[in-house]
Amino acid sequence: MSDRNKVEFGRRERKKRMLRDAIIKASYELFSIKGFNETRVEDITEKVDISTRTFFRYFSSKENVVLDYQEAENKDFIVALSNRPQSESVITALRHAAVEVVKKCEKGCYGFDAVRFMTLQELLISHPLARAKSFQNSENRKDLIISLIARRMGTNSSNDIRPSIVVGVLEYAHWAAHNTWKQKNIPLCFIPTFLMKYF
């Protein structure tokens, strides 16, 4: 690819990312004002000034808009864990990978902030389909992490439950950190600090 083509490709990708972010932003604004069920895809496309066809090139449904950040976060976690030094213990590698991704969330790397996070949690409680998709995403991520941990431990997860136990502990640590953050109404930056200290 020539330098000119690389520049043009980069420009197109930035425009796509900007439009994707605009769709997510408009969707969350409408969800918080009108409610998830009451917000139509047409409402979102009107707010962003795009066609319905364009919307569906980026997202297959409203639920996918809601969970876009989760899929990006899951991919980044897998990459972060894969890149940890083999000399690290399993727990240390998991801890650093988890903190790396949570800090990116805190910085808004996934187009997410505390307000959107709370909106998402409310949607997951009240909307069964979004909750089901979120659960499936979590299960897929868990399976990948278990495979990575098993490889790091030099074992097979089909007959060794230790990788599953380790990943279960990570899930509980995430839950405990999130629950404490929500109950105490403290800054989002508390979560990586909690994970580094207690996990």
Image (spheres, rainbow, N blue to C red):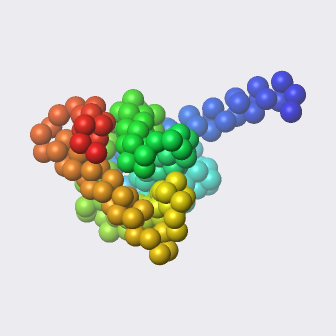
- In x, y percent, where is residue 66? 41, 52
Identify the image quadrant of residue 165.
bottom left
Report the residue at 49% width, 74% height from top.
Answer: 158
**Where on the picture, by quarter, is residue 17?**
top right
Q: Residue at x 13, y 45 (%)?
A: 183
The C terminus - image quarter:
top left
Q: Provide residue 1's location: percent of width, then percent of height.
A: 86, 33
Viewer-proximal residue among 18 and 180: 180
| Above or below: residue 185 compared with residue 39 | above
**Above or below for 59 versus 132:** above
Q: Nearer the viewer, residue 131 or 103?
A: 103
Q: Vertical placement of 35 versus 183: above or below?
A: below
Which residue is at 87% across, 28% downward? 2
135 up-or-down from 90: above or below: below
Q: Is any atom of residue 131 visible in this view?
A: yes
User: Residue shown at 29%/50% (left/top)?
Assistant: 174
| Rendered location of residue 10, percent (x, y) | 71, 30
Answer with the quarter of the image where residue 7 lies: top right
